[in-house]
């Protein structure tokens, strides 16, 4: 497996670090293997945040209310004398 976006030198350094860590203990090695297998199975989406529809609506409501309030403040402040 090759690392995408890393230079050849960075890949060599990363491989050396991985070899040293694997020599460090069987438990760590087993966990690294499990992590790698899971990463291949689930892909990058395993780190994606899961938001419910209710949370999305709440955030959208806050954004709309805030932007509406700020717009109103700017429009009303535009009429005030300097």
Image (cartoon, rainbow, N blue to C red):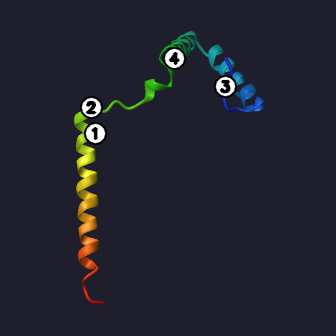
Q: Is 36 above or below relative to 54?
A: above
Residue 18: % across, % down: 65, 21
Q: Earlier in the sequence, mark 4 or mark 3?
A: 3
Q: Is 58 above or below relative to 27?
A: below
| Nearer to us: label 4 or label 1 | 1
Q: Is 32 above or below relative to 45?
A: above
Residue 16: image quadrant is top right
What residue did someone put label 2 on?
52
> Do tag 1 and tag 2 residues touch (Cβ < 8 Å)?
yes
What residue did someone put label 1 on?
56
**Number of marks in the rendered image:** 4
Q: Earlier in the sequence, mark 4 or mark 1?
A: 4
What residue did someone put label 4 on?
35
Residue 27: % across, % down: 53, 11
> Do tag 2 and tag 4 residues touch (Cβ < 8 Å)?
no
Distance from Cα at disc 3 to Cα at disc 1? 34 Å
Residue 38: % across, % down: 49, 15
The quarter of the picture where the C terminus appears is: bottom left
Q: Earlier in the sequence, mark 3 or mark 1?
A: 3
Distance from Cα at disc 2 to Cα at disc 4? 27 Å
Judged from the image, the secondary structure of the residue bearing numbered disc 2 is: loop
What residue did someone put label 3 on?
3
Judged from the image, the secondary structure of the residue bearing numbered disc 1 is: helix
Judged from the image, the secondary structure of the residue bearing numbered disc 3 is: loop
> Do tag 4 and tag 1 residues touch (Cβ < 8 Å)?
no
Q: Residue at x 44, y 28 (%)?
A: 47
Q: Residue at x 74, y 33 (%)?
A: 7
Q: 4 or 18: nearer the eye?
A: 4
């Amino acid at each position: 497996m090759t690392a995408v976006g890393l230079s050849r030198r960075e890949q060599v350094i990363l491989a050396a670090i991985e070899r040293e860590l694997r020599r460090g203990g069987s438990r760590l090695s087993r966990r690294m293997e499990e992590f790698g297998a899971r990463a291949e199975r689930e892909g990058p989406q395993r780190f994606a945040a899961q938001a419910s529809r209710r949370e999305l609506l709440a955030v959208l409501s806050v954004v709309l209310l805030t932007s509406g309030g700020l717009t109103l403040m700017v429009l009303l402040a535009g009429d005030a004398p300097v």
